[in-house]
């Protein structure tokens, strides 16, 4: 029923109930469809934006991996230089060499079939990860070998420090090592050291690191000092005017142990210097590396 203003004419309509329900259903369907289409539109819009964002991030990540691979290549070159130096050090000091294959610490096995399904960036990332892991393993291995070299060199350094290698005093060589004429008897006999002549009071120094084994006097050698250097080496310094070290005292190469004199079996102020190893007397001149 339609009721107009007071001047209008009253009108009456008849609408079937089915029609009313149909209109309501259609309206609801239209409204639901509108919501669905709107949701789909915005979802696709968001998905597309997200995809573009992921693509940009993927491209940036790919570039970073490529840069990382360049950096890794530079690190590997520097590492190769370190390995080369370690090999040279081993050769120089006659240390055991390391087999080239052993250095690689190789790993094996077939590649996974799933790799073909990976994107280019994923494959780059996987390859970079493998190279980093390999570099870490071989660098740890090389660090162990450098530690071994350091220990060996420290041993060599200690041995060199305890090996006689310098002149024990200043002066001139008045008598050499070997079969020489005895100044008192005139007969030839074995002279087990060298004689270095100079003024009384000239400083006598230790020719290598060691410990004083003997600081005493005897008829033939006069006042003398014997140093045990370890590694089988001993040195003896005879005819001193004065000894300034005691038995058991540690000395370094270059430390003053006494002063030149003419005590004992001697014709004048000089130092009688001997070098022996494992009880065998050696020519001291073969163990003098520095110049006077």
Image (cartoon, helix red, strand yellow):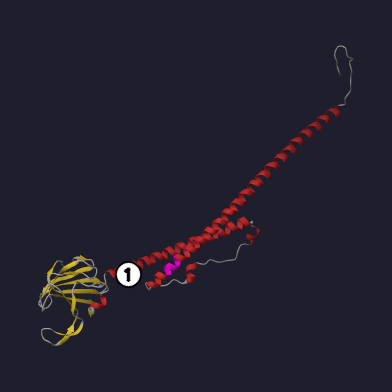
Q: Quadrant of the C terminus?
A: bottom left
Where's residue 142, x and y in %?
A: 44, 64
Where's residue 92, x and y in %?
A: 38, 72
Residue at 46 percent of width and 72 percent of height: 99
Q: Is residue 85 magenta?
A: yes
Where's residue 159, x and y in %?
A: 29, 70
Residue occupied by mark 1: 156
Considering depth in this image, is 205 or 6 the residue closer to the camera? 205
Residue at 48 percent of width and 71 percent of height: 100
93 with respect to 130 (left or right): left
Counting other residues with Cα less than 10 Å from the Cα at mark 1, is it few (<14), some (14-19), or many (20 or more)? Answer: few
Where's residue 105, x and y in %?
A: 49, 66
**Residue 120 visible from this viewpoint:** yes
Q: Quadrant of the N terminus?
A: top right
Q: How many marks?
A: 1
Considering depth in this image, is 10 or 122 the residue closer to the camera? 122
Residue at 21 percent of width and 71 percent of height: 228
Dominant secondary-structure state across the stretch colored magenta: helix
**Residue 95 visible from this viewpoint:** no
Q: What is the magenta range?
A: 82-87
């Amino acid at each position: 029923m339609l009721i107009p203003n007071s001047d209008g004419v009253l009108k009456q309509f008849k609408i079937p109930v089915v029609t009313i329900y149909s209109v309501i259903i259609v309206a609801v369907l239209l409204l639901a469809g509108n919501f669905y289409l709107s949701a789909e539109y915005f979802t696709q819009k968001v998905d597309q934006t997200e995809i573009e964002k992921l693509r940009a991030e993927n491209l940036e990540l790919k570039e970073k991996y490529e840069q990382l691979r360049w950096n890794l290549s530079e690190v590997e070159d520097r590492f190769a230089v370190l390995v080369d130096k370690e090999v040279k050090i081993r050769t120089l000091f006659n240390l055991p060499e390391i087999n080239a294959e052993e250095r690689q610490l190789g790993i094996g096995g077939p590649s996974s079939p799933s790799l073909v399904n990976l994107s280019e960036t994923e494959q780059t990332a996987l390859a970079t990860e493998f190279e980093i892991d390999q570099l870490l393993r071989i660098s740890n291995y090389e660090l162990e070998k450098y530690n071994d070299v350091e220990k060996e060199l420290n041993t060599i350094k200690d041995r060199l420090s305890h090996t006689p290698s310098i002149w024990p005093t200043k002066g001139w060589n008045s008598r050499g090592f070997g079969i020489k004429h005895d100044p008192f008897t005139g007969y030839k006999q074995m002279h087990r050291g060298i004689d270095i002549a100079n003024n009384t009071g000239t400083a006598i120094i230790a020719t290598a690191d060691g410990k004083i084994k003997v600081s005493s006097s005897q008829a033939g050698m006069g006042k003398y000092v014997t140093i045990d250097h370890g590694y089988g080496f001993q040195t003896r310094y005879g005819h001193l005017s004065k000894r300034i070290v005691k038995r058991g005292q540690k000395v370094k190469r270059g430390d003053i142990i006494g002063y030149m004199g003419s005590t004992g079996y001697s014709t004048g102020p000089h130092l009688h210097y001997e070098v022996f190893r494992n009880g065998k007397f050696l020519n001291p001149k073969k163990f003098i590396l520095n110049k006077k």
